Image (cartoon, rainbow, N blue to C red):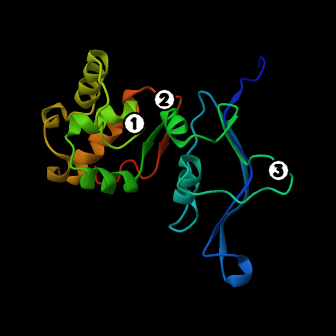
Amino acid sequence: MGGMSQPLLEIDGASVMRGGALAAGGTLALDNLSFVVRSGEHVALLGPNGSGKTTLIGLLTRREWPLRRADGRPPVRLLGRELGDVFELRRQMGIISPDDDRGFIAERCTALEAVLSGFFAARGIWRRQVSAEQEAAARAALERLGVADLAARRTDAMRTGQLRRGLIARALVHQPPLLLLDEPTNHL
């Protein structure tokens, strides 16, 4: 095999604490986790409920924060960079999670607006300028997922499976280098 490409994702000794300090009864949800994912690789995390799969997704999307390493090195790097600006980070990912389902129901946007928001790494499009190319890509993504007829329907009026397919379209629309899928087939 030729020269190794730069890792897409590097996790080096990441730990996440839940419920306060260990001395106060807290627990390590992730303890010294390390692995590397390179471009083109597919990784599946399997395990029982409570084993840390969703915590890992949260760590990568900055919904969870790692403990500081003693040597000061960042425990998580994406595309060779330390995770910093959350919006820039999320532009590099397509994310599917049950948290997003709930958030988009509360947002009460249309399916098309939800998919378009994938270009902006945010929920909703607010006052952002949407190009004709972005709208065409969003409509094509809804079509690929079989929910083009729902483009004008509000997310709070969709069945769970319809919403999930719309949010999968959102994760794919901007063609991110990394997809993070937490229970992606739930409700389909």
Indicate the position of residue 142 as horizontal and vertical percent values: 25, 31
Q: Residues within 10 Å of mark 1 (few under 14, many from 20)?
A: many
Q: Which tag, 3 or 1, sits closer to the chain's start? A: 3
Residue 140 disc label: none
Q: Are marks 1 and 2 in contact (CB under 8 Å)?
A: yes
Q: CA distance from mark 3 to mark 1?
A: 32 Å
Q: Nearer the viewer, mark 2 or mark 3?
A: 3
Return the x and y of residue 183 as percentages of the image width and height.
42, 53
Query: Which residue was labeled with disc 2?
Result: 176
Q: Residue type at mark 2?
A: Pro
Q: Secondary structure at mark 1?
A: helix
Mark 2 or mark 3: whose residue is earlier in sequence:
3
Name the residue tied to disc 3. 72
User: At label 3, which amino acid type do we have?
Assistant: Gly
Q: Using residue 14 as the reference point, say whether residue 89 is left or right of it.
A: left
Which residue lies at the image location 74% right of the left edge and 82% below the top edge?
23
> Horizontally, is 118 left or right of 71 in the view?
left
Taking the image as shown, residue 130 lies to the left or right of residue 82, namely left
